[in-house]
């Protein structure tokens, strides 16, 4: 099919939540390179919104898909034991603070599960605590509960009154505002260590440590949403490890499957022990294929120390971006291979993304007029340099 034929079908039949998409349809990928229907190559600096940590057609991912598919078992349900699920849960517990893991199909489902777990923890104690405090400009998902936890008015407005009750937001990196917002009914504080959708805003180390101390003092659970920041993206397996702040509950997704949909809720035994049979579940969550792919990808990332790779390449990419002398760039910030380029108002990030696409480079945006860079972790030095040159050239047109 031609691109125009695909666009026509999309306009007629797909629910229009994405509006007019960027005018390209990728049909093949290899490494950090995507190819459209006409065979044109594009260097990917966005990785499917920080998902494809190992790029495209990586043996650790493609090989696992093929091997599991050839067994004939993609899904059997959670009524039975699933070997890759058990192995993946053990691997995640071995390399994080967690003692228990539950698998979902997405980051939104993982965050929904984390909210449920926090409330069930206090319910099991006979406590009426139910409130969840999160941050302005956060993003936690598209379900009704995670929309209520997401600090973006535009995402919340169409769904008011928000469900469930008891979710509120305060300014990020503002400890005084957070402390003032908690009360005796607060069950948990939900934060991203680095706000991705919110503009690539790293949490201040002193702020996150103070939040942990507040939670300990007031008996509140700390939930870290590491859907975007996890799986080596920010320079450690999970970002909390660089902050030396251990959450009670953590969520993961995106890079966890390196392109295959999977999410996870990770928790300490103290919190997880509140869950009883039937309290939560999922038909597809933790299915055989998803866990086999994630297990293979995670083993590869850990064995080849991609946390160090992301730190080193991220520093190199940040230096290249900061060397661009364009007046349209206000700031370059981030951690590891999750970077944001803050732009002046006369240079719309969405227009810059189109200009880069025309030059053969895929990038994304974040709130606050930010160009968001979250490439596959296998991005080469030559590809970084080519992107920096293309960005410099594209900015000259604004």
Image: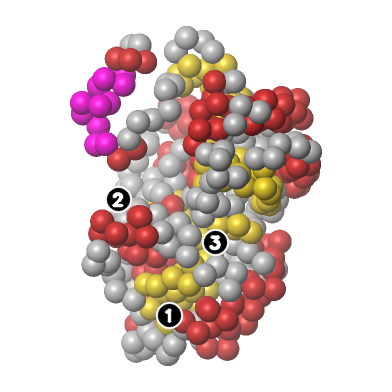
Give yes or no for residue 393 being in the magenta stretch. Answer: no
Q: Are marks 3 and 2 in contact (CB under 8 Å)?
A: no
Which label sits in the foreground, 1 or 3? 3
Q: Are marks 1 and 3 in contact (CB under 8 Å)?
A: no
Q: Quadrant of the N terminus?
A: top left
The quadrant holding residue 276 is bottom left
Most foreground residue, 165 or 325: 325
- Mark 1 sits on what residue? 187
Q: Are marks 2 and 1 in contact (CB under 8 Å)?
A: no
Compared with 186, 71 (above or below) is above
Q: Residue at 48%, 27% (x, y): give it.
A: 66
Q: Which residues are magenta?
A: 6-16
Task: Measuring from the top left, give residue 242's x and y in whole percent.
Answer: 71, 61
Label 2, secondary structure: give it: loop
Q: Which mark is residue 192?
A: 3
The quadrant holding residue 297 is top right
Q: Quadrant of the C terminus?
A: top right
Q: Which mark is residue 33?
A: none
- Mark 2 sits on what residue? 283
Task: Measuring from the top left, give residue 124's x and y in whole percent.
Answer: 36, 83
Q: Earlier in the sequence, mark 3 or mark 2?
A: 3
């Amino acid at each position: 099919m031609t691109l125009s034929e695909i666009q026509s079908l999309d306009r007629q039949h797909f629910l229009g939540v994405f509006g007019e998409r960027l005018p390209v349809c990728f049909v093949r990928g290899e490494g950090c390179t995507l190819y459209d229907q006409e065979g044109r190559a594009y260097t990917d600096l966005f990785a499917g919104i920080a998902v494809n940590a190992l790029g495209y057609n990586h043996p650790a991912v493609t090989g696992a898909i093929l091997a599991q598919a050839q067994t004939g078992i993609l899904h059997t349900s959670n009524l039975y034991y699933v070997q890759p699920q058990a192995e993946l849960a053990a691997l995640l517990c071995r390399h994080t603070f967690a003692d228990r893991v539950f698998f979902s199909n997405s980051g939104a489902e993982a965050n929904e599960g984390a909210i449920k777990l926090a409330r069930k923890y206090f319910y099991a104690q006979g406590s009426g605590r139910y409130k969840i405090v999160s941050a302005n400009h956060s993003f936690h998902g598209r379900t009704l509960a995670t929309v209520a936890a997401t600090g973006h008015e535009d995402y919340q407005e169409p769904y008011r009154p928000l469900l469930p009750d008891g979710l509120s937001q305060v300014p990020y990196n503002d400890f005084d505002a957070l402390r003032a917002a908690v009360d005796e009914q607060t069950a948990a504080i939900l934060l991203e260590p680095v706000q991705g959708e919110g503009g690539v805003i790293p949490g201040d180390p002193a702020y996150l440590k103070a939040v942990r101390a507040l939670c300990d003092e007031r008996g509140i659970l700390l939930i870290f949403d590491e859907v975007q920041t996890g799986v080596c993206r920010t320079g450690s397996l999970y970002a909390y490890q660089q902050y030396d702040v251990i959450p009670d509950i953590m969520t993961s997704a995106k890079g966890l499957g390196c392109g295959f949909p999977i999410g996870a809720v990770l928790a300490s035994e103290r919190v997880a022990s509140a869950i009883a049979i039937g309290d939560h579940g999922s038909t597809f969550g933790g299915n055989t294929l998803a866990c086999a792919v994630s297990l293979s990808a995670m083993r590869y990332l850990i064995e080849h120390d991609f946390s160090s790779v992301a730190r080193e390449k991220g520093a190199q990419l940040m230096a290249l971006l900061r060397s661009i002398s364009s007046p349209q760039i206000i700031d370059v910030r981030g951690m590891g291979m999750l970077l944001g380029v803050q732009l002046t108002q006369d240079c719309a990030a969405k227009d810059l993304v189109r200009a880069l696409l025309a030059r053969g480079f895929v990038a994304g945006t974040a709130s606050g007029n930010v160009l968001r860079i979250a490439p596959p972790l296998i991005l080469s030095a030559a590809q970084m340099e080519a992107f920096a040159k293309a960005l410099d050239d594209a900015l000259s047109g604004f």
